[in-house]
């Protein structure tokens, strides 16, 4: 009887953090909902996305799966990059880390790319606003299978890494 | 015994709560970052903490030696941070601010490798390295042009020869050119 008081305390100690974790991350749907509410827009649902998902999974030999897409057309509200970033980060929840953020002060161009490890796979979450169109995409990729598949379409003489280095000149002009 | 269980459970609960709020950030004065971002017309941020570098390394399972070496390099790094600020007009950031950023890394561990100033064009380049027991454990690259400011910070064991290997990672293409520039400076024998 003396130890009975411990039970609710232990339960609370265990349940509270779990509830905090769960509440902090609503995932893809949470992000889409919050964008709808904040910017007064409605997401266009992609028809037959389940089928597309299945085909993508088969076609890439399980390289791509769990595809979620939401498209916002006629996006007219001004977007504060900081606010959007905070909102998405908060709704996505733990595990996700933002790796790339591109933002323009005018607000009509915003890109956020988040990643999270999913065992042997990798989760990618992309929010992209370009003018009046915003796309939100979540996908799970298997690096091994994806590279294998991409390799099939790569020209033997085409070196992506080499091109990237050549194209993005930071000090190249100066050194010449 | 009762109190031990209680301590254990509370400790577990305390551990679980902050785990969700861990965010990898560029170890720079946040105020400078904020001010620059507020004035810039376009901002690009690449933030790859140790966790994400481990994930990125998974994409490098190529059979060739170069890719294996790049993978090994990435796996050993603690973080890669890139900040690129583009401004509408000249003079939207001062050389004092650039100096402030540079000074942030002026400690006994960090030493200047390249310091280039072009008064005519108003461009400047700084490359600093963190030396721990004679080995490079970090690299800081700061490049300023009249309407653009680029900061690259690589934490972990990295050598100048390795920069070219990182250029394949999104947003780090320019590192190959920095490597060339440093080699050129070394051959030229000065700033």
Image: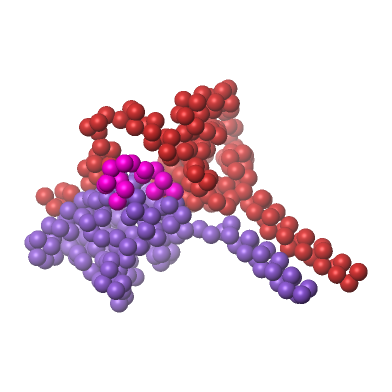
Chain colours: A red, B purple
Please give the range of residues in magenta.
B55-69
Q: Residue reaching furthest right? A: A1
Left or right, B2 with reference to A173? right
- Image point 59% across, 32% down: which residue? A42
- Image point 13% across, 65% down: which residue? B191
- Image point 17% across, 63% down: which residue? B116
Q: Residue reaching furthest left? A: B188
Left or right, A50 with reference to A79? right
Q: Position of residue B34 (x, y in %)?
A: 42, 60
Q: Position of residue A133 (x, y in %)?
A: 48, 32
Left or right, A86 with reference to B104? right
Confirm whether residue A131 shows in the render: no
Please say if A42 is above or below B100.
above
In the rendered image, which quarter is residue A148 located in? Answer: top left
Please say if A133 is above or below B111.
above
Inspect the magenta stretch and tell me whether residue B61 lies in it: yes
In the rendered image, which quarter is residue B183 located in? Answer: bottom left
Confirm whether residue B189 shows in the render: yes
Quadrant (top left/top right/bottom left/bottom right) for the N terminus of chain A: bottom right
Inspect the magenta stretch and tell me whether residue B3 lies in it: no
Q: Position of residue B184 (x, y in %)?
A: 12, 57
Left or right, A176 with reference to A147? left
Q: Position of residue B117 (x, y in %)?
A: 17, 63
Q: How many marks?
A: 0
- Image point 36% across, 44% down: which residue? B60
């Amino acid at each position: 009887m003396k130890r009975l008081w411990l039970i609710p305390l232990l339960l609370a100690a265990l349940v509270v953090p779990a509830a905090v974790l769960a509440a902090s991350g609503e995932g893809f749907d949470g992000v889409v909902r919050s964008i709808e509410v904040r910017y007064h827009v409605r997401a266009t649902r992609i028809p037959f996305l389940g089928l597309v998902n299945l085909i993508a999974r088969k076609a890439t030999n399980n390289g791509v799966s769990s595809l979620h897409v939401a498209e916002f057309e006629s996006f007219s509200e001004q977007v504060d990059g900081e606010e959007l970033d905070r909102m998405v980060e908060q709704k996505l929840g733990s595990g996700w880390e933002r790796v790339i953020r591109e933002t323009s002060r005018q607000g009509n161009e915003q890109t956020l790319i988040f990643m999270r490890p999913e065992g042997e796979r990798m989760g990618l979450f992309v929010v992209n606003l370009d003018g009046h169109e915003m796309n939100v995409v979540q996908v799970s990729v298997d690096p091994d299978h994806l590279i294998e598949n991409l390799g099939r379409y790569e020209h033997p003489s085409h070196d992506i890494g080499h091109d990237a280095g050549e194209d993005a000149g930071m000090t190249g002009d100066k050194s010449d | 015994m009762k109190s031990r269980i209680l301590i254990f459970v509370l400790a577990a609960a305390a551990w679980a709560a902050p785990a969700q709020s861990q965010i990898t950030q560029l170890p720079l004065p946040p105020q400078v970052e904020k001010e620059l971002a507020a004035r810039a017309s376009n901002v690009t941020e690449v933030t790859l903490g140790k966790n994400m570098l481990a994930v990125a390394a998974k994409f490098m399972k190529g059979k060739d030696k170069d890719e294996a070496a790049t993978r090994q390099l990435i796996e050993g790094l603690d973080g890669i941070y890139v900040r690129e600020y583009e401004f509408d007009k000249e003079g939207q950031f001062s050389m004092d601010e650039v100096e402030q950023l540079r000074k942030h890394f002026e400690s006994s561990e960090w030493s200047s490798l390249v310091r280039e100033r072009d008064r005519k064009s108003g461009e400047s380049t700084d490359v600093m390295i963190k030396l721990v027991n004679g080995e490079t454990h970090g690299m800081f690259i700061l490049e300023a042009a009249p309407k653009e400011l680029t900061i690259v910070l690589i934490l972990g064991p990295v050598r100048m020869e390795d920069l070219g290997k990182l250029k394949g990672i999104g947003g780090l293409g320019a590192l190959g050119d920095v490597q060339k520039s440093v080699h050129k400076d070394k051959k030229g024998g000065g700033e």
